[in-house]
Image (cartoon, rainbow, N blue to C red):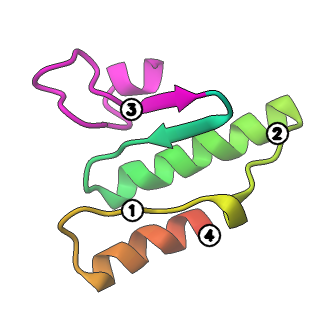
Amino acid sequence: MKVARQGLITGLLPEVVDGSIISLQYVDDTLLFLENNLEKAGTLKWLLTIFEHMSGMKINYDKSELLTIGLDVDSTNCFARIFLL
């Protein structure tokens, strides 16, 4: 992803995989991975919104889940607000 190469979003294991692991896709499911960075999460939300407008498809956030690892409830809620707006 061009945005990953430019450092606008960062996924998992950037020290192991050039550009880091941002997504995995299985049939009709997509897993997105991000580092703990609210600004970059906002960039990803912006990219998803642009994708919706350009493709005419809609992301069903009601059927989506946000999983955090090692974050307290307040930090998790900050990420959730980004993707619910």
For the residues marked 1 and 3, what is the alpha-carbon distance in whole angstroms? 14 Å
Judged from the image, the secondary structure of the residue bearing numbered disc 2 is helix
Residue at label 4?
A: 84
Q: Secondary structure at mark 4?
A: helix
**CA gap, disc 1 to disc 4?**
14 Å
Query: Which quarter of the rendering shows the C terminus?
Result: bottom right
Distance, label 1 to label 2, CA atoms, is 26 Å
Q: Say which amino acid is labelled 2.
A: His
**Secondary structure predominantly adopted by residues drawn in magenta:** loop
Which span of residues is magenta-colored?
1-26
Circle 3 residue: 22
Disc sitting over residue 67 in the figure:
1
Residue 31: image location, x then y, percent: 48, 41
Residue position for label 2: 53
Q: Is residue 28 magenta?
A: no
Name the residue located 42 percent from the left edge and 53 percent from the top edge.
Answer: 41
Which amino acid lies under the numbered mark 4 shown in the image of this protein? Leu
